[in-house]
Image (cartoon, coloured by chain):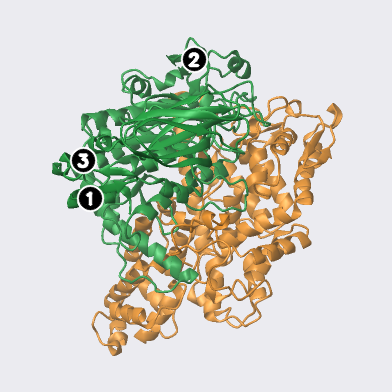
Chain colours: A green, B orange
Amino acid sequence: MKRRNFLTSTTAAAVGTQLLGGVPLRAFSPFELLPTLAEENDRILIVIQMFGGNDGLNTIIPCEDPLYYKLRPDIGVKQTDAINLLSKVYMHPALDPANTYNMKRMLEDGRLAIVQNVGYENPNLSHFRSTDIWLSGFNSSNPDDRLVDGWLGRFFAKTTPGFPDVLPPDPLAVQIGGTLSMLFQSPKGDVGIALTDPDKFFELGKGLSPDLDPMPGDTRYEREFNFVRMVAEQSDRYSQVIKDAFDRGKNMVKYDDNGFVRQMQLVARLISGGLKSKVYMVYMGGFDTHVQQQNDDNTGLHPFLLESLTKGVGQFMQDMIMQGQADRVVGLTASEFGRRPEQNGSRGTDHGAASVQFVFGNRVRSGVFGNAPDLGNFNENGDLRYQYDFRRIYTDVMETWFGGTPEDTESIFGERILPLGVLQDPVSVRDAYVGRTKATIRAYPNPAATSMFLEWRQDVPASVVVEIWGTEGRFVGTEFRGNVQPGVVRLPLSPAVGAGSYLCAVTVNGVRNVVPVTFMR
Amino acid sequence: MNRRQLFSGLASLGVRDHAPADMVMPMVGGGIEPYDQPLTLDDVYHLFRRIGVGPSYASAKTYVGKLAADVVSELLGAEDEPAPAPPGTWINATTENPLGADLQTRFAIYAGWNNQMAALSNWWIKQMASEPKGVEKLTMFWSGHFTTEFSFDETYVPPQSMWRQYLMLRKDRLGDFRELTLDVTVDNAMVWYLGGHFNEVGKPNENYARELLELFTVGIGWYTEGDVKEAARVLTGWKSARYNDEPTGPNGIFNAYFAAQRHDVGAKQFLGQSIPGRTADNNTEYQVKNEEIRRLIEIIFEQRPVEASRFIARKLYRYFVYCSPTEVDETMVEALGKIFRDNNWKIKPMVHALFSSAHFFDPGLRGAQIKTPAEFCAGVMRQLGVEFNDPQSWTKKMDQALMDPPNVAGWPGYHYWISTNSYPVRRQFARTIIDSMTDDQVMTFIKQFTDYDVADKFVREVCRLLLPVTVNSARHDYYVKTLLQNAPSYDWPKILDEKPAAAQRTRGLLVAISKAPDFQLS
């Protein structure tokens, strides 16, 4: 049984003492009088795909590193032009256009997280393979491994009851424009629909349900027949649902007239109209800036794209705030790779590796994650090394945002990935009551030769799991699993790992606390 | 957990409409060996649907009883198939560089190009709808393989160059693949599209070099980043000639040319092979093209023959046989690749073997292919005998602007073709074209069939023509009822005497068939 189901049924029964992971739930607790929390998760994710490979170094800029200007004598953004955010962190001025809510202002308001050095092992410099890696959530360097479906497609196919035999009343995912992304494909069929214009969709889509039943067999022909048939049915059903939401919905902000910004406007209107889709995907192309990526005055192809991005995100967010929807939405950007630190001969940049990612919304931990890009230590191809596996943010989304379990995450990726912690854990009153709160973990001595102690204080008995993870977020091993008594807890930690830095995750009553640890050996 | 399972997404989900990569469907019986049965009408239909855009009853009948190998030879056309008449005099029209012009002139140039590109696309779709062979569809395959986008990054390739690229692909479509690749490499549109124009000694631009390896010849995984860099050096020095106010070089406008001072004359190391350096004396277009670029392409096929041949064969298989990325028959891919290698990279023997193989005619593969938008539109026009205005505006809404794919990998195809965006447009296109048929056009359609005056037989023949797999009896009865609209079937001959009534009922039948999911399949 899942924890949340367990809690619900316990509340309903409201007798006796139940053990949950070693914690007694007191009978007749005052929280039983509260209305049962709605189990339906009404949260929304916006995925912004920036195709072509966004130049992270000219997005969040290490202006205080002289190597940056050596690598980019022609297209480097001058320190005097860039916007200083935090110590040593600068932003391209195109991200802070005047007269609009934008990403710079969102950072000041605590609504933006900047994650530096995101990537994966053995970076692939093909747009297509790398896009497939980002969308599928599988990093495979073997070209024979076919990546055919998306991490969100698999997640919703797994966690949506009855899918796909029962089509949900609202599409689980909506992609604005174009053909349906791999992100929303799953082995059980598509979890999303593609939408360009709600009125046209309604006009063309209504009445398209086929007058033929699905084919019973599983030949190639029958399978493709049933695929087309399902799209026909989705067109019929969802054209009405979308139209209703679109007509009910509104925008309370004036949006710029620009393709990407208009897509964000449509998403806001559908959310405002009550469409219950969980994910929206919008797409921006043009980031493959091999040639003439920017002029000396910080205008040009790449600045134009950044300006579209910041306007679309800012205006959307402002709209959501004004409509009281801002707590429900979180957005993330994804691009298949960054660009080579050294500029090329055409005032542009060639394909690179690690890059910067944005996460936005009221519920993000605002700030800068990750170190400044290390311009003195490239990989063998002259590209940036990564610090965080790209799936760490995906894990935040699945576990913190959509209520998935670590087991869901493991089955989606085929391996365990530690969430980055870029989204705030929702802590309810009930969580606090049963001791589900963050602990302050001290690790000492740290760094240590081979072993150290973990120490913290807790007020209730607790189940504890101690795990070691790589700093990029991939699982290494479990060191301790058991119950401990209230008071000051002290556990020895002596993992069989090589010298280096790791993340130690101490999960106390289901709440994960992460502390960096270093072993010298 | 088995890694393979994980990648096909089965691990936690159970198999439903998606089979694992390594073991799946009922096996397809036939292999590469020639299909030696005399062709039935259904065989001929199947062949026409895949090698072209769809059969007509009259032409298909003339091939019944013949052997696949002979019919395929005829449909592939000659290698020196005469060039078609061009779509208009605009193919030689020149403009100034719009970026240097005032805004009004610039937008006028862009508008002109958009109109010309629409004209070229309409012309091509109509060519496909009317040609009796499979010349255009194979050309379209290469156009989707060696992609060039008419519009990209807020800029354009002039349609005059796209036209010349089309002619080149058509001319080379059956020949030596290495020659085709060479022609593409120095094609004016391509030199502009993938950055060759900017690729200069000391300032390399890797864009084309990477795609040459990754997308056009051998596929990812069989070269290093160092090979990409060295190939980019080989390819330095080419310029694209697009405007009448800029230098065009010796080859004239709309033909790429070589600028010797921009070429990297140093020696190169590519896939473990040396390409010698040169001096100023032999740094000419002819010599660099033949000694360096030709050599570069030869090295790919010498050093990676198995990988390259399978890469191309696999793409051909997916385009013409079954597009599912997880269900490519690798035995067939290797058999085709071997023919490709054994014939010294000539395309024709491989394509001929594919279309005349027992595998191709196996019933397990029929009706499994999703029609591309261009095929769908040209096919409906051809099979219903209707000339239709501006089909390209429809294929665009179905996510296919010809010669303007979404990115350099071309159209992803397969399920990407059918979405809640595009499927309703396909339905509306079919409906619009059926509604547009005059009574006379419908009567011509009806009377092409031998037994058109027997309702049951008429419906059967229409379904055979328009749908890829024989319909079951319940569906057949439903279509007969739709045609007769409650009249007894012996009244059909009488209805046929009243042209408007017969036409109206037949339109109803066609609309019902066009609603079927398998109207999208071939």
The reply, left or right, for residue B361 in relation to residue B401 is right
The foreground one among B467 and B336 is B336
Secondary structure, mark 3, is loop
Q: Position of residue B295 (x, y in %)?
A: 79, 43
Residue extending furthest bottom?
B490
Amino acid, disc 1: Thr
Label 3, label 1: how far apart the Cα atoms are: 38 Å
| Mark whose residue sits in front, 1 or 2 | 1
| Mark whose residue sits in front, 3 or 1 | 1
Residues at marks 2 and 3 on the same chain: yes
Amino acid, disc 3: Gly
Residue extending furthest left?
A33
Among numbered discs 2 and 3, the one appearing first in the sequence: 2
Mark count: 3
Q: Position of residue B335 (x, y in %)?
A: 70, 66
Secondary structure, mark 2, is loop
- Can residue B78 be seen here? The reply is no
Among numbered discs 1 and 2, the one appearing first in the sequence: 1
Q: Circle 1 sits on which residue?
A: A10
Badge 3: residue crowd in 10 Å (few <14, some 14–19, many ≥20)? some
Q: Is residue A150 above or below residue B71?
A: above
Q: Circle 2 sits on which residue?
A: A88
